[in-house]
Image: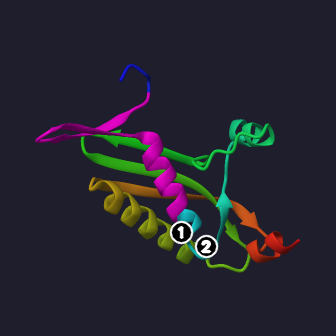
Amino acid sequence: MADSKEYISCPDELGAIHISEDVLAVTAAAAVLDVEGVGSLAGNLGSNLAEMLGKKNLSRGVRVTVSESTVAVDLSILVRYGSSVQEVAKAAQNAVCAAIENATGFTVEAVNIHVAGVTFEHPRKAAQG
C-alpha cells in the first residue's frame, strides 16, 4: 500500500483487512444524508470547484481521523430551514456512529457535526423542478 491514504488495519486469521479513510468518509456521508432535516453536506472551495468541473465527491465536507482501531469524524452540513438544528445534529451523530460501527466494527470515538448553514430548498421540490 504505497499510496498516502490512511488505512485502518484489522488483523485476521487469514491475513489483514485494510479499510481506507475514503470508505469511512463515504459511509459517514451516506448516513448523514439520510437524516431528516439535513439539506446537504457543506463543502469547501476546492470540493465545490471540483463538483463544477464534473467530479462529484460524496465525501466532501467529511474529515476522518484514524488512530489505532478508533475513528473520529468531522462533518459539515447544511440544515433545512424549519428544522431544529440541535435535533438534526444529534440525529446525524447517531446515524454516522451507527453506520461506521455496523459497516466496519471499529469504535467511533467522536462524531463532530459542524452546521455550516441553512438551506431553503426542499429535496422533493428540487427533484420535481
What label sits on residue 78 in the rendered view? none
Residue placed furthest toward the left: 13
List x then y, in percent, for residue 119: 76, 66
Answer with left or right where residue 87 lies relative to residue 47: left
Q: Which residue is depicted at the point 45% across and 68% down?
A: 95
- How far across and down, in percent of the image, does residue 90 sit? 48, 71
Q: Amino acid at mark 1?
A: Ala
| Residue underneath mark 1 | 89
The way the protein has been coloured in the rendering is: rainbow
Identify the amino acid type marked 2: Val
Q: Which quadrant would residue 69 be assigned to in this image?
A: top left
Residue position marked by numbered label 2 in the rendering: 85
Q: Name the image quarter holding the N terminus.
A: top left
* Quadrant in which the C terminus appears: bottom right
User: Do the CB atoms of the residues marked 1 and 2 lie less than 8 Å apart?
Assistant: yes
User: Regarding mark 2 in the picture, which secondary structure is present there?
Assistant: helix
